[in-house]
Amino acid sequence: MLEVIEYRAALPEAIVLSAYGAGSGWLLNIQTDATTEVIIAPRRFIAAYRFPDDEEAGAAALEHQEHDHLFRPLIR
């Protein structure tokens, strides 16, 4: 399961949080198969991934917590 905490439609790029950590199936899939397709709303594209640095991840998480009250306790 993934939670999109920031979506940048112009790129398109999404910052996602993995509910099950670095061993999640979706992450293992995109690491081993360069043709994995991702669907976000009406857009479909081949997945690429990178790990954001602490500053970028922290900023996205802090912004997201303002809009998602269920996510807020995880950030704090």
Image (cartoon, rainbow, N blue to C red):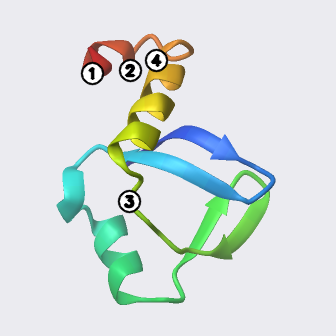
Instruction: Measure how far apart labels 1 and 4 are at the Cα level.
Output: 9 Å
Dot 3: few (<14), some (14–19), or many (≥20) neighbours within 10 Å?
few
- Say which amino acid is labelled 2: Phe
Instruction: Measure how far apart labels 3 and 1 are at the Cα level.
Output: 19 Å
Which mark sits nearer the N-terminus, 2 or 3?
Answer: 3
**Tag 4 residue:** 65
The image quadrant of residue 35 is bottom right
Of the two numbered discs 3 and 1 in the rendering, the one whose residue sits closer to the viewer: 3
Residue 6 % position (x, y): 58, 39
Instruction: Measure how far apart labels 3 and 4 are at the Cα level.
Output: 20 Å
Q: Is residue 40 left or right of residue 74?
A: right
1 up-or-down from 62: above or below: below
- Say which amino acid is labelled 3: Phe
Which mark sits nearer the N-terminus, 3 or 1?
Answer: 3
Instruction: Measure how far apart labels 2 and 3 are at the Cα level.
Output: 20 Å
Residue at point 29%, 74% (across, down): 28
For label 1, the SS is helix
For label 3, the SS is loop
2 and 4 marks in contact (CB < 8 Å): yes
Dot 2: few (<14), some (14–19), or many (≥20) neighbours within 10 Å?
some
Instruction: Measure how far apart labels 1 and 2 are at the Cα level.
Output: 6 Å
2 and 3 marks in contact (CB < 8 Å): no
1 and 2 marks in contact (CB < 8 Å): yes
**Tag 3 residue:** 51
Residue 43 % position (x, y): 77, 62
